[in-house]
Structures are given as structure tokens and as C-alpha cells.
Image (cartoon, rainbow, N blue to C red):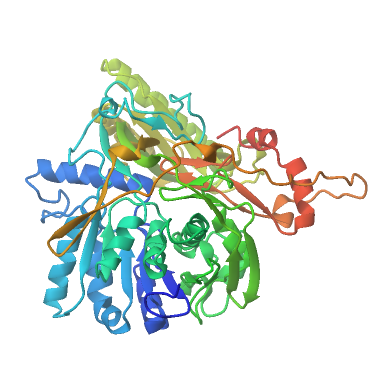
Amino acid sequence: MPTKSGKPRVRIGCYSAFLGDSPEAAAQLVYEEGANLDYLVADYLAEITMGVLALKKNARLLSGGKDVLTGEKGADYIGQFVHLILKRLLPDLKKNGTKVITNAGALDPLGCKDAIEKLLDKLNIKGMKVAAVIGDDMMNGENMTTLDTFKKDIVSFSPLSVKNLELDADRFPVNNEPIVSMNAYLGAKGIAAALEAGADIVVTGRVVDSAIVVGPLMYEYGWHPSKQKNYYDLMASASLAGHIIECGCHATGGNFTDWKRAAYSPYGGYSNMGYPIVEFEESGEFVVTKPEKTGGLVSVGTVAEQILYETLDPALYILADVILDMRQVQLTQVGHNRVHVKGAKGLQATPYVKCCGIFFDGWHLNGTLIIGGSDAKYKADAVGNAIIERSRRMLKDRGMEDIREYNIEPLGTEAALYGANAQSHGTREVVLRVSAIHKDRRALQMVAQEIMAPVTCMAPGTGFGQQPIPLPNLVHFPCLLPKTKSSTEFVIGSTTQKVDWDEWDSGLKYQSPAPLPPIPTATESKGLVKVKLISVAYGRSGDKGDVSNIGKLYSIIARDPKYLPYIKRSVTEEVIAEYMKHL
């Protein structure tokens, strides 16, 4: 089936991986690609971003509806999307016929839609329709709730365990700890339906990251379970395409193991990183590329690293609309900065929708001091321990609870990241970071004062660093809720339409994926030499919320298939756990 536009392929570019990404990236894609860019997409919402936005919303409501920092009327969507991106680029987007899809709606997609429509009127741009996809807010507009609200329906979706939910890296809220946000990762059908209804710009709240790419492809090719026998394979391939580009420059050399190839690449390297584009074909195969005359690179290595980023089980990457099996994906360099991708397989989706929950767990504090001169590391250790010891004594004297957790990190000495594996060297400048958690903000205000005091009362060579301020300690917890508890709607103009889920796999057949041949066993034992892992492999770690994992979320990719059996034999879970036990 040809695309709605009649073009041989659909070209989609992504300009944002998270809220802190460069606003200049959107202009790069729009100006460099022009009318060749069919869709401009952006992902703004990291997991913890939802909690931060929710706390800002609550603080604003307590302040009469005004932003506590600016005093102006606040917004619960991503304001920079409207004021920095669209205000500058709308005339070109209109001229080029490029549609825009983004989750910049955040906590208020309808408010974002309204702001865009007002901007269109202000710029006197006619004929562009804006739609908002809603339904992800599982708290139904409530500002705070507790786990009891969901307890009869909730299922754990922990990356570590489904049973031990009290580990710091793996726990649910307890004892009525307040949940400040709970958002379902909606699928792509709402986006596709909005486009079918004529939308030129679609804003959503929390959706599956890849949905901003899957939605346009569903719309362009008219995918439906009743129409295509390979529907789930197509959805899986589209999801893989979305996954590759939704983290922006991760696919074009950002965080790449061979970092110098990106940093010193032609056309400006890091200073002019090219943002990713997928060229998707009717068959489900696609090419990953970037604008010409931009920095970075698109190689089998850069794409492979991003494919395995955050995916957990490569046989069962569970998404709202499909389960992606990427075990047979093949990458081929087909040109300069062009990588061809094929082989994704799909399974019918589960009966559950994944949710992103954020709860409030007291307060946290991070303060820094600059310590220089001879014995800088040892001075930093002494100062950090003295700060904590003094603070604990002060809290005890005042009848307050002890600091719940603390951390002393002499940054620049390798001790924080490498522990016992640190290479000893006599560094003469250290950033001392002191962190603490307490349920009482007043206790951390006392600690904050003590972090500044060593500038005059402790080690020589100590200078001011970051002024510490107690902030809410937000904890991310993933979970599942039945799809029957969530619904998707889109609003275009003044019309609201409901979008149903596809049928799901009620028999849970996805729990037994088809086996594939195992990785061959390493057979050579003679003539082997010991090398650094980086010499034979690429690597990419992953993070979710406040957890950054080295184990199950860390992906190792052999630079050559012949290395894989030896990597598997050497890089075991036990080896990694021992090396990283200090963390």
C-alpha cells in the first residue's frame, strides 16, 4: 500500500531526546531537509520529568495558579516547544508540508493545543490543524494519591524483580507515601487517528517513546490487524525505527563508544551534531541517516548501541501496541552515514499498559566544594566525613531523626565510579560532592549550612562549589495496569473521539517466545591474548527514572561476530557484579 502522500518512503526526523536537548536541533532538520522531511518528531518526557512537572503544578496551585519562580501564569506542558520551536519554525513547516508529532503536551496536552492554536492566529497562519491525544493520566486530574488507589489492579514491572519491591532501586511507595504522578504509556493509535482526522500538529502526554514515529507510519500506510497479515511485524519494525531515533543523537554518535569518531567528525563534530532521520519503506525495512554536512556519524555501531539501549529482553521488548523481538535484526552499512535495518519481528500486545509512577520520598540535598592542593583526595574524604558527622550530631542534639542516607564522593579521583578498581594518582584538584536524604526539609537545611562552613574551618585549599538547596526526593516506579483501566481519546477542533485498543493476547502466548540457536561456545584456548573489552565490543548502558543499571540494562555488542563467544564466556553477570559492587 502506497503512503497517503504518494511518496515511495516516509522520512521522519527527531530533534529532541529529552527536555534538556538543544532547541537548535529542530531548525537543523527543518532548514536542511526542507520539504523532504515528512514528519518532525520530538520526545521531551524522561520518566522523572513527569514527577518534576507534577510537583511544579502542585506548587503553582498552592500559589494561586502562578509559577513559584517567575510569578507568571504557569503551564503544565513543555513551553519551549511552543515558544522556542514552533514560534520560529511554523512558517517553514507550513510551507514544506511537514507535520509535527511530540509528547510536549506533558501534563496538559489540551493546554498545549490551545497555546499552539493561539500562536497560529498570532502568526496569521491558516489551514493548520492541531490535535491533542489524552488519556494517559491515571490519576484523573487528582494532584496526589497513594498506592491504595491502584492496589487491586496493579502489577509490578520492575527491571530487577517482581517480588522484592523494597530495594532502593526497585520499590513501590509504602505507608501512604504520596504519588504525585501516574501516567500510562499510551500507544500510537491515537496519533494515527488524529492524523487521519486532518491534524498537522499532534501533541500528546505520556506515550510510548516510539509512538511518535509509529503513529505517522500507521497513518501513512493504513496498517490494521485485519488488513496486513504481517501487521505485528510492521508495527515491530516501526517501533524499532522509533526507538532508534527517539533518543536523538544517540543514533548519530552521541554517547558512542568510539567517541572520537563523532567528536572530530567532518562539519563540526560535536558542535554540529546531526540529528537522526529514518526513511521507512512499505516493506517495513528502513534506513537510518542524518542531514548532510552535519557532525557525528551513522554507522552499524551507533545504531546497534541505540537499539539495545533500555530494551531489557531483546526477545520481548514490551510496548503498548506490539511486542518487539529484535533478535534477528540485521544492520548493513549501505552508504556514507546510511544504515539499513531489517528483520524485526512482532507479537500481539499484552493485556497491560505500562505506567510511569512517581512518588515523593522525603527530601534530598547535593552540595559541592572545590578542594585543591597536595593530598586533595584525602582532604576531601576528611572534610566530607566531618560534615556528615557534625550534621548527625547536631540533629541528635535537637531531637531530630538521623540522616537516612548519605554519600561522600571525591569526584575526579575515580573513587566514586571505580571503587577498588580506581587507578591511583595524586590529583591536586577534587570536587567534593556531599549528598543526603531526610524526611524533614529542615534537617537538610541544617546540613546545607554545614557544607559551606569548611571553606574557612577545615582543609586548606577549600573553595565554594554549588550552594546546596533541599529538593523533593522523587522516586520512579514502573508498573502495569490492565488496558481496561485506560482509554485513549484525541481532540481536534472542538471534537473529541475515542480510540480503542487493538485486541490483545489474552492467552499470554508472548510469555514463550520462539527459541533461536544459542551463541556458539568459545572453543579456542591456546593463542589467546588478554585485551580490554572496549577493543572487541561496543557498549551502551541504560537508565530509567532514578536507576542507572550496569547489569541487565547494559548492552555489549561484539565488533565482529567471531568475538561474541569469547565475550559471552568472559563478561558474565558475576564478573560485572564483582567489578561494580561498590555501586
- Taking the image as shown, residue 302 lies to the left or right of residue 224, namely right
| 40 lies above or below 32 | above
The single residue placed furthest to the front in the displayed view is 226
Q: Looking at this view, is 219 or 366 the one in front? A: 219
| 404 lies above or below 124 | above
- Taking the image as shown, residue 293 lies to the left or right of residue 140, namely right
- Taking the image as shown, residue 432 lies to the left or right of residue 525, namely left
| 179 lies above or below 261 | above
Residue 74 is situated, as x and y percent measured from the top left of the image, at 14, 54
- Name which quarter of the figure residue 386 lies in: top left
- Taking the image as shown, residue 46 lies to the left or right of residue 51, namely right
The single residue placed furthest to the right in the displayed view is 526
| Residue for point 29% across, 82% down | 92
The single residue placed furthest to the left in the displayed view is 64
- Name which quarter of the figure residue 362 lies in: top left
* Quadrant containing the N terminus in the rendered view: bottom left
Residue 78 is situated, as x and y percent measured from the top left of the image, at 25, 58
Q: Number of labelled discs? A: 0
Q: Looking at this view, is 352 or 406 the one in front? A: 352
Residue 580 is situated, as x and y percent measured from the top left of the image, at 61, 36
* Quadrant containing the C terminus in the rendered view: top right
- Tell me if residue 169 can be seen: yes
- Name which quarter of the figure residue 569 lies in: top right
Q: Looking at this view, is 416 or 266 the one in front? A: 266
- Tell me if residue 372 can be seen: no
| Residue for point 53% across, 57% down | 233
| Residue for point 50% across, 78% down | 294
Residue 495 is situated, as x and y percent measured from the top left of the image, at 15, 60
